[in-house]
Image: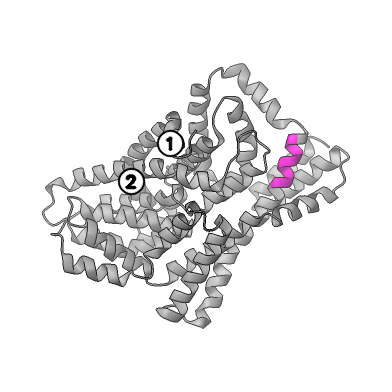
Amino acid sequence: MSVLVPLILLVLALSGTPLFVVIAASAIWGFYQTDVDLMVMAIEIYRIAEMPVLIAIPLFTFAGYLLGESKAPQRLVRITDAFLGWMPGGLAIVALVTCALFTAFTGASGVTIVALGALLVPALQKSGYPERFNLGLVTTSGSLGLLFAPSLPLILYGVVAQQMSLDVAVSIDDLFLAGLLPGGLMLVALSLYSGWVSRNAERNHHPFDKAEAWAALKDTKWEMPLPFLVLGGIYGGWFAVSEAAAITAFYVLIVSTLIRCEIPFKQLVTVMRDSMKLVGAILLILAVSMASTNYMIDAGVPEKIFGFIQQHVSDSFTFLLLLTLFLLILGMMLDIFSAIVIMIPIILPIAVEYGIHPIHLGILFLANMQLGYFTPPVGMNLFIASFRFNKPVMELYRATLPFFFILLATVLIITFWPGLSLAFIGE
């Protein structure tokens, strides 16, 4: 029977059973096997619901969906073009920065490709960039903002890590700071490549126009305070992450519906429903995963895995190299939210044993998962872009390859240079 249950769970997973059902079933079976009262499942779910920081996830998600349904993407493209479009490769850099900022607030790379792709690809084409470059740029840029606050994966990693009772504190504020340099490195690397690609193009940039820059600045007067509201409020000590999320959601709601009037009240219900679908999926998986995590900890699963790995891997360098390969494959097969709540409870204790800082692990984990979004053959962004731009997936494979290798190099730098992630948090 003990062999049959894992096989049944595997069949359920492969047959399309919701992930939270499979995780919950495995946790219930584990507790049942060890004669632990199954009431522990309900207790774990309630414990998750009590966490104050968890309210940041639905609130930031709602704010991100509101921004996506409004005309904020167009204004974001306009202002970045006004201030950066004059540079060599300027419009490509505009696309990179715009997508990174938009993904940071929505937390979903697919939403960025769908929302901004229709604006950016034709604009790049008109400015003389090669079509393959344009497709690769937008497909890649869709996941760039995952390391920037207030990215949902950063918050979720912090929530999961805080349940692990580690000796080193893992605060979401520190994670927000830790992602700045690694995320900036990715943007700089792709910006340099974009400038090199556009070196022979004659129509790829325009002179700096003060009047247009001022007009774009005035047009985004309601969106401009958002980064300062979130980051300035948190690091200024004015409010916590959950309070920043509440203020952000309220602010975006008022601006979108009452000030700009871009989202009618009848559409508001649809936006709420769509955003809460994502939130519901995340919280369900998180709740049952925490119960499953506690079972694994009680059963000593991380210690057993660490003991096995230690027999074959003697140093942290080799461990990080193998972890990078594993995360690339994982990023192709599993969405980032599920990967965090399922794998972090297993990987984090092992990484700590190898002397890897939990904050550094979070950044390298998300950086690798970000790369997995467009890693052939089954990276999710490839299929979203294929559908959005009506192009064969094979064409997207070829288009993203240069971007893949550039970002792979930056991911390796992030992975093996912990100081890049820990520079702002005093570690």
Dot 1: few (<14), some (14–19), or many (≥20) neighbours within 10 Å? few
Membership of 292 in magenta stretch: yes
Residue 378 seen by the camera: no
* Circle number at residue 187: 2
State the predominant SS element of the stretch in magenta: helix
Q: What residue is pinned by disc 1?
A: 423
Q: Is residue 302 left or right of residue 327?
A: right
Q: Position of residue 93 (x, y in %)?
A: 27, 52
411, above or below 191, in the image: above
Instruction: Magenta stretch: give its range.
Output: 290-297
Residue at x 73% of width, y 35% of height? 297
Figure quadrant of residue 270: bottom right
Q: Is residue 255 left or right of residue 300?
A: left
* Circle number at residue 338: none
Dot 2: few (<14), some (14–19), or many (≥20) neighbours within 10 Å? many
Residue at x 20% of width, y 50% of height? 89
Three-letter amino acid code at the position of disc 1: Ala
Q: Secondary structure at mark 1?
A: loop
